[in-house]
Image: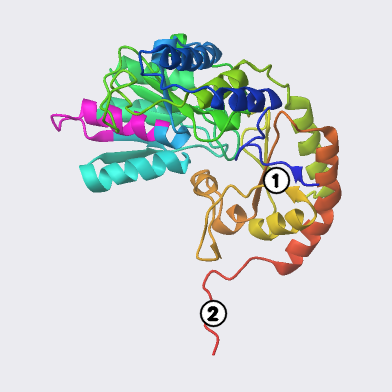
Amino acid sequence: MVVYLDHAATTPLLPEAIAAYTDALAVVGNPSSIHSAGQNAKRMLEDGREAVAASLGATPIEVVFTSGGTESVNLAIKGLYWARNADGTRPRILVPRGEHHATVDTVEWLAKHDRAIIEWLPIDGHGRLELTALADALERHDDIALLTLLWANNEVGTIQPIAEATALAEGRGVPVHADAVAAYRHLTIDFASSGLAALSVSAHKIGGPMGIGALVLSRTASIEALIHGGGQQRHVRSGTQDAPAAVAFGVAARHPVAELSPLRDRLIDGVRAAVPSAELRGDPVNRLDNNAHFTFPGCEGDSLLFLLDAAGVAVSTGSACQAGIPEASHVLLGMGLAEDDARGALRFTLGHSSTAADVDALLNALPDAHSRASRAGLAARTPSLGG
C-alpha cells in the first residue's frame, strides 16, 4: 500500500464527492436547455456553485466554473491584462518571483505575443513577497495592468501578505488576482472583504474531481474572455457547463476542514530528528497547515523521491526535470538558495486522508533513502557523451 504524502499535487476524492458525482452523471440534461430536464441539471449546477461561493465568501454570480486552476489563472491574468491594456497604455504586469508555473508561463506568453512588460518583484528568504518592492513599483509606474500573486506558495508553503499587497495596489487603482489553489480550504478566504478583482481555485486540491476549478470574479472587474461561443457564464467563459463535476465540487467545498497543523509539526520534527542536516524551507510559522518542505544538502531531490517511492512513500520535489537533467526549483532560487542546495528539495504535503501512521512510515523510510541518496551525490549538470 502506498503512503501518499503529495496532497498538494492532488488529494484523493472524498467518498461523498464520488457518490454525488456518480449519481449526478446519471442525470440527463444540458443546464442551458429550458425544458424540465435541462432545468433540473441547472439546479444541480447552481447548487454546486452556491456551495463553492459560500466556501470562499463570495456570491454565486461571482463564481465562474473553469476546467481547473490553470485555466482560471490564464483567464484572470490574460483577461484582466487585455481589458486594462486595450489601448496599449498599461502593458506592465507585476509578478513576484516564485509563482506557480501557471502564472509564470502565462505572463511570459503575454510578453512574447502581446508585448507585456513583466516586472518581477523580489521575495525574501522564506519565499514571501517584499512589500517595499511592491510599493516602490506601484509608485514608479503608472502603466500597470495588474498585480498577480499566490495566496500561499505552493512549494514551500509560505503564506503571502495578501491583504497588505491588495491594499497597496488598490491605492493605485491596480486590480489584483490571487492564485489560491494551494491555500483553498487550508486558510480562511473571504473574497467579499479581500479587495481582490479575481481569485483562482481548483476542486481536485480539496477532495473534488479533476477537470473543474473556479475563477471568482468581482462583479466590478472588467475582463476579456478566453473562450467564446455561447457566453454561458457572464460572457466570461463559454461552453456547456459540467453539472456533475460542479455537484461534486460543491460537496468537497462543504466538507468539514481537517486540522492538519499537529500532523504537519510531527512530520517536521521527525524529519529533523531523522536527518539533522535537513533544512526546513518557507516560513517556519506562517505556513500552510499541510506543507513541510525541506532541502537535503548533498542529495539530489529526485534520488530521494525515487528511493522513497520504492519504499512505498509518495512525495514531491516541487521542481522541474527536463530531458533527464535535474533542474533547481525557481522558487528556491528566487529565495536566494544556491543551485546545488535548491536541487536537494522534497515537499511533503498532507490531506484529509493523512494519518500519523503515514508520517511514521515516511520517517522510517527516510534515513535509508537519505543515506543512499547522499552516497550518490548530485547528478552531473551536463550529460556525458559515451563512445
Asked where in the image residue 297 lies, by quadrant, the reply is bottom right
- What x and y, as percent, mark residue 383? 53, 75
Q: Residue at x 81, y 47 (%)?
A: 1
Q: Is residue 73 magenta?
A: yes
Q: Nearer the viewer, mark 2 or mark 1?
A: 2
- Residue situated furthest bottom in the rendering: 387
Q: Quadrant of the C terminus?
A: bottom right
Question: Which comes sooner in the sequence, label 2 or label 1?
Answer: 1
Whether residue 93 sits left or right of residue 249 in the image: it is left
Residue bearing the label numbered 2:
384
Could you say whether the residue bearing mark 1 is in a helix, strand or loop?
strand
| Segment tinted magenta in the rendering | 72-92
Q: What separation in Å lies between label 2 and label 1 (alpha carbons)? A: 31 Å
Which amino acid is tagged 1?
Glu
User: Is residue 361 positioned above or below 181 on the image?
Assistant: below
Whether residue 367 sits left or right of residue 181 in the image: it is right
- What x and y, as percent, mark residue 146? 31, 27
- What x and y, as percent, mark residue 81? 26, 31
Could you say whether the residue bearing mark 2 is in a helix, strand or loop?
loop
**Dot 2, how many residues are within 10 Å of its Cα: few (below 14), some (14-19), or many (20+)?**
few
Q: Does the rendering let one see residue 350? A: yes
Instruction: Please name the predominant secondary structure of the magenta segment in the image.
Output: helix
Q: Does the rendering let one see residue 184? A: no
Residue bearing the label numbered 1:
279
Whether residue 147 sits left or right of residue 317 in the image: it is left
Q: Residue at x 22, y 35 (%)?
A: 91
- What x and y, as percent, mark residue 352? 71, 28
